[in-house]
Amino acid sequence: EAGVAQSPRYKIIEKRQSVAFWCNPISGHATLYWYQQILGQGPKLLIQFQNNGVVDDSQLPKDRFSAERLKGVDSTLKIQPAKLEDSAVYLCASSQGQGSYNEQFFGPGTRLTVL
Amino acid sequence: KQEVTQIPAALSVPEGENLVLNCSFTDSAIYNLQWFRQDPGKGLTSLLLIQSSQREQTSGRLNASLDKSSGRSTLYIAASQPGDSATYLCAVKSFQKLVFGTGTRLLVSP
């Protein structure tokens, strides 16, 4: 069974530029998550989708970050414009459902460096 | 608000030693607790998941325990190997959210 796929793996941009990340979850997984992991910290949930609807985006900086999951399968996360403090690894995860006993499976992440 | 703390932040041991990593959480109303491994520049690999009704889980040389009432979990690694070198993250599922600790960076020397 294929795992969670993410691209690109690495991205370097200058501040105020825009960037987009892509995630393809495990086939059949209805719930998709985007996390931000700053160096030396644990991952922090940015947004959670159930199919193509947003369940939780309370920690998403909506003035610059946006995410969508059209058709309820793959998803894109966009930052526009980027700031220096956005340098982090962006992890995508998926689970079969959003129930409490559903295990999340993580992709390899996209490492973003903002100069 | 759930907070997860991991101690120590870093640990260095010689090969062959048994070791314990600690995780504590502030709100005992959790659904499960998960231990992950993260290699440099990589994503997270799930090691063990303990449901709130369970006390421990074992996989090979790894054993994780959960004491929900005291808000603590430990990850025991037996006979450590250089290949175990990585960052170990603890995460609790609380109100359908996974809340992570900051991790323990483990280095096992040959």
Image (spheres, coloured by chain):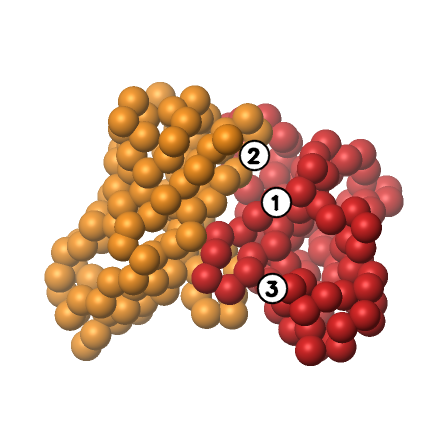
Relative to A87, residue B62 above or below:
above
Residue sitting at the far right: A70
Looking at the rendered structure, the kind of residue marked 3 is: Ala
Name the quadrant containing residue A58: top right
Q: Secondary structure at mark 3?
A: strand
Chain A is which colour?
red
> In front: B101, or A5?
B101
Looking at the picture, how far across and down is residue A4, in whole percent? Answer: 63, 54
At 27% from the left edge and 54% from the top edge, which residue is drawn?
B8
| Residue topped by disc 2 | B97
Question: Depth-wise, is mark 3 or mark 2 nearer the camera?
Answer: 3
Quarter in which the C terminus of chain B is drawn: bottom left
Looking at the picture, how far across and down is residue A23, in whole percent? Answer: 72, 56
Q: Which chain is orange?
A: B
At 29% from the left edge and 22% from the top edge, which residue is drawn?
B69
Name the quadrant containing residue A29: top right
Specify the subunit that label 2 lies on: B
Real-space Cα separation, disc 2 to disc 1, in angstroms? 8 Å
Q: Secondary structure at mark 2?
A: strand
Tag 1 near tag 3, CB within 8 Å? no
Left or right: residue B72 compared with residue A55: left
Looking at the rendered structure, the kind of residue marked 1 is: Leu
Q: Residues within 10 Å of mark 2 (few under 14, many from 20)?
A: some
Looking at the picture, how far across and down is residue A14, in whole percent? Answer: 76, 77
| Residue topped by disc 3 | A88
Tag 3 near tag 2, CB within 8 Å? no
Q: Are marks 2 and 1 on the same chain?
A: no
Looking at the rendered structure, the kind of residue marked 2 is: Lys
| Residue topped by disc 1 | A45
Among the two numbered marks 1 and 3 on one chain, the one whose residue lies closer to the N terminus? 1
